Amino acid sequence: MKYTVVLPAAGSGKRMKADRNKLLLELSGKPIFIYTLEVFDRDPDCEGMWLAVKADERELIEQYVERYKIKKVKGYATGGAERQDSVRAGLEMAGQCGVVLVHDAARPFISPVVIRELVEQANESGAAIAGVPVKDTIKKVRESVITETVNRAELWMIQTPQAFRYELLMEAAQRAKADGFLGTDEAMLVERMGHPVQIVESTYENVKMTTPDDLIYGKAILASRLQEE
Ligand SMILES: Nc1ccn([C@@H]2O[C@H](COP(=O)(O)OP(=O)(O)OP(=O)(O)O)[C@@H](O)[C@H]2O)c(=O)n1
Ligand SMILES: C[C@](O)(CO)[C@H](O)COP(=O)(O)O
């Protein structure tokens, strides 16, 4: 089943504490975001990628896309102050399509099997997102004191890709903008419209490169994949 993907790539990577957009940092000699783009470039069901980038980074990103021979980038939207603004700009530029995926450019280890499952579920039900069950015990804390231990059986760590029928996500994104609502993922915008969102079990490898320790994990994932080849 065919799909289009919007990739927000216009962040600044404050938590990574790097001297540039963290997506440009290299893992085993290749920029993080190139690994991400390669997954979609290789997927025969992916009809095209739309990147949301900072205006002053566009030229550099285009150069990398060319250097690594990424074929399916259809265009670049100008990202906004918040991730949600960047995603909306990407969606507007992508235009009407059947199923659209939103995927953080900062998650280079997404599994093609999970992508396929998400697209199928979104086509059937309208909305499906990737996630993994939490592994640790989770507690609520106020002023350094535990106030509650939450039932872990109901808790999932949410990732991207998040897949939707295009018109559903576009409506949710426009309503959020009109209401001044800011969510940390796309599903929140769809949930507030009362539309059910399915979860698809993903892998723990699909980590977002957020803090310096994630880079160590990323390098280990690449090394173990090389060994398996
Ligand atoms: N205004 C923004 C903020 C984030 N992103 C993108 O959204 C994804 C996930 O965001 P996050 O990991 O929070 O990235 P940063 O905003 O770069 O990181 P930080 O919050 O640490 O500054 C990344 O691919 C990032 O480039 C974006 O396109 N536009
Ligand atoms: C969308 C997301 O990747 C799901 O885990 C995440 O919520 C992005 O949040 P961030 O705080 O901008 O990293």
Image (cartoon, grey):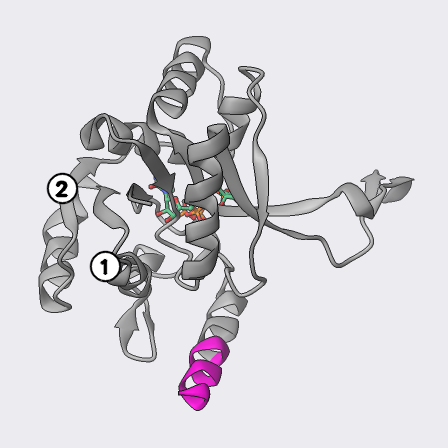
Q: How many marks?
A: 2
What residue is shown at x 32% (from left), y 27% (from top)? 88
| Alpha carbon distance from label 2 to label 1 | 14 Å
Picture quarter containing residue 225? bottom left
Query: Left or right: 10 with respect to 71?
Result: right
Choose between 41 and 175: the one closer to the eye. Answer: 41
Picture quarter containing residue 141? top right
Choose between 184 and 195: the one closer to the eye. Answer: 195
**Residue most extreme to the bottom:** 227
Give the numbered dot on residue 87.
Answer: none
Choose between 31 and 166: the one closer to the eye. Answer: 166
Q: Identity of the amino acid at label 2?
A: Gly
Locate the N terminus and report the quarter of the image it occupies. Answer: top left
Per the image, label 1 sits on a secondary structure element best described as: helix
Which of marks 1 and 2 precedes in the sequence? Answer: 1
- Local crowd at mark 2 within 10 Å, few (<14), some, or many (≥20)? some
Per the image, label 2 sits on a secondary structure element best described as: strand
The range drawn in magenta is: 220-229
Placement of 100 over or under 96, stated as above or below: below
Locate the C terminus and report the quarter of the image it occupies. Answer: bottom left
Q: Identity of the amino acid at label 1?
A: Asp
Give the numbered dot on residue 41.
Answer: 1
Picture quarter containing residue 55? top left
Placement of 5 over or under 209, stated as above or below: above
Placement of 66 over or under 11, stated as above or below: below
Query: Left or right: 148 with respect to 39?
Result: right
Q: Is mark 1 within 8 Å of ligand 1?
A: no
Percent position of residue 222, x then y? 42, 78
* Magenta stretch contains residue 206: no
- Residue located beneath label 2 in the image: 75
Percent position of residue 180, x then y? 45, 14
* Magenta stretch contains residue 226: yes
